[in-house]
């Protein structure tokens, strides 16, 4: 087995990124049971451990505590970075993770980060390689604000990409809390007309435009327009919004399937790409709000053998990244916005593909400043 360590340094911010590629150079199967992204040894224990905890509509509370001898840290096994535990040390990965700190008997500190090994095992055949997710470390001698500035520079210059990396984001109006599932074309146009008069630049149609989606128990996966609500289709609505001088955005939740849907057995990633791409291509969509409202549970797949089943959570994230990569390449003019019940998946991995994030379903102004 060979392990190749990869480091990236940046000349415009005090940031180091670290990853590793593990390759099976032998003839037998090699089974990885843990693959950390980072192991950083520090010379003493005079540090505070700062993590970001929270819940739906209460994302990223700052938790600060002194390091003590022993083991402490934060982790997620939800298949996403999650509302409850944000990967604050800026792990560039969107799935299950851990970040732990150990202080030994010599009062030296060791920080480890990486894939959560409780649900991880990866089998490498001869000649195969596995690359661990990238860990990103920032340093500042000027407190939290200084560290935040380093991450801002990193994200703006090296993580976010495409035409929106340095562009002002449009002022938008989303119909969700005005209508929920109860709308038709005339109601939406009436809202859009008032938005245009106020100088709004983007009108976003949220959940309920597809399948027979009258509540949140049906139709996810059925990405075809509901002609009961929109008898003239999405294109007509988009054209009317464009005629008002606004861009037109659309909500999707491609990572979930409702039991009550026209279920497909096609390869999932290819299907999701085609379903989303067809809607974008045919209807003049300028913006996508990509939502994810369910974390992984009861992990299993008929596509994997029992030996490879622990690979599923990481394969899920790699599949998501592959879909987003294809969509970004084919629709560079579309502004993609990440959402996960608000801020349940706010991390640099998603920010690489989606230059805008819906940071919380809590839209109270004071709460938003804190979040």
Image: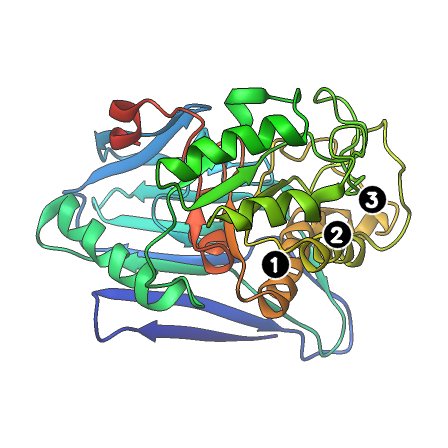
Q: Secondary structure at mark 2?
A: helix
Residue denoted by label 1:
324
- Residue on which disc 3 sits: 301
Secondary element at tag 1: helix
Taking the view exactly as shown, the residue that stands out farthest to the left is 142
Along the line of sight, which residue is nearer the eye, 250 or 216? 250
Q: Is residue 217 above or below residue 133?
A: above
Residue beneath the point at 63% across and 68% down = 330
Residue 93 in sight in this render: no
Residue 97 in picture, x, y percent from top left? 50, 45
Q: Nearer the viewer, mark 1 or mark 3?
A: 1
Q: Is residue 140 left or right of residue 262?
A: left
Instruction: Determine whether the residue tagged by mark 3 lies in a helix, strand or loop.
Output: loop
Task: Calculate the distance from the C-alpha at mark 3 to the C-alpha at mark 2.
Answer: 17 Å
Please state if 339 lies on the left or on the right of 45 as rendered: right
N-terminal of the pair, mark 2 or mark 1, is 2
Measuring from the top left, give residue 131's x and y in whole percent. Answer: 57, 67
User: Camera-side residue: 282 or 66?
Assistant: 282
Mark 3 packing: few (<14 Cα in 10 Å), some, or many (20+)? few
Mark 1 crowdedness (10 Å alpha carbons): few <14, some 14-19, many ≥20: many
Crowding near pointer 2: few (<14 within 10 Å), some, many (20+)? Answer: some
Residue holding disc 2: 272
**Which of the 4 image quarters holds residue 86?**
top left
């Amino acid at each position: 087995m060979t392990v190749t360590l990869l480091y990236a340094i940046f000349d415009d911010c005090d940031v180091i990124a670290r990853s590793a590629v593990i390759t099976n150079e032998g003839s037998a199967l090699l089974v990885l049971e843990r693959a950390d992204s980072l192991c950083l040894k520090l010379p003493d224990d005079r540090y505070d451990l700062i993590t970001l905890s929270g819940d739906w509509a209460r994302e990223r509370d700052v938790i600060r505590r002194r390091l003590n001898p022993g083991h402490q840290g934060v982790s997620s096994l939800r298949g996403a970075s999650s509302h409850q535990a944000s990967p604050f040390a800026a792990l560039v990965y969107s799935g299950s993770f851990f970040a732990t700190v150990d202080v030994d008997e010599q009062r030296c500190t060791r920080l480890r980060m990486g894939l959560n090994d409780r649900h991880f095992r990866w089998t490498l055949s001869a000649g195969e390689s596995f690359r661990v997710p990238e860990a990103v470390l920032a340093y500042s001698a000027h407190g939290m604000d200084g560290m935040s500035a380093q991450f801002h520079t990193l994200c703006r210059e090296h993580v976010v990409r495409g035409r929106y990396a340095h562009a002002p984001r449009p002022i938008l109006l989303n119909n969700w809390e005005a209508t929920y599932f109860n709308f038709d074309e005339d109601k939406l146009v009436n809202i859009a007309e008032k938005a245009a008069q106020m100088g709004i630049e983007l009108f976003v149609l949220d959940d309920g435009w597809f399948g027979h989606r009258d509540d949140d128990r049906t139709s996810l996966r059925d990405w075809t327009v509901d002609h009961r609500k929109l008898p003239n289709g999405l294109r007509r609505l988009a054209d009317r919004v464009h005629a008002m001088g606004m861009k037109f955005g659309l909500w999707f939740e491609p990572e979930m399937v409702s039991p009550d849907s026209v279920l497909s057995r096609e390869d999932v990633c290819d299907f999701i790409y085609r379903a989303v791409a067809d809607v974008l291509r045919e209807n003049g969509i300028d913006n996508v709000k990509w939502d994810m409202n369910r974390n992984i549970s009861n992990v299993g797949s008929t596509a994997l053998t029992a030996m490879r089943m622990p690979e599923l959570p990481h394969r899920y994230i790699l599949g998501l990244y592959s879909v987003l990569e294809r969509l970004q390449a084919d629709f560079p003019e579309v502004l993609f916005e990440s959402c996960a019940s608000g801020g349940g998946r706010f991390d640099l991995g998603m920010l690489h593909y989606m230059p805008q994030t819906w940071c919380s379903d809590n839209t109270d102004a004071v709460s938003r400043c804190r979040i």
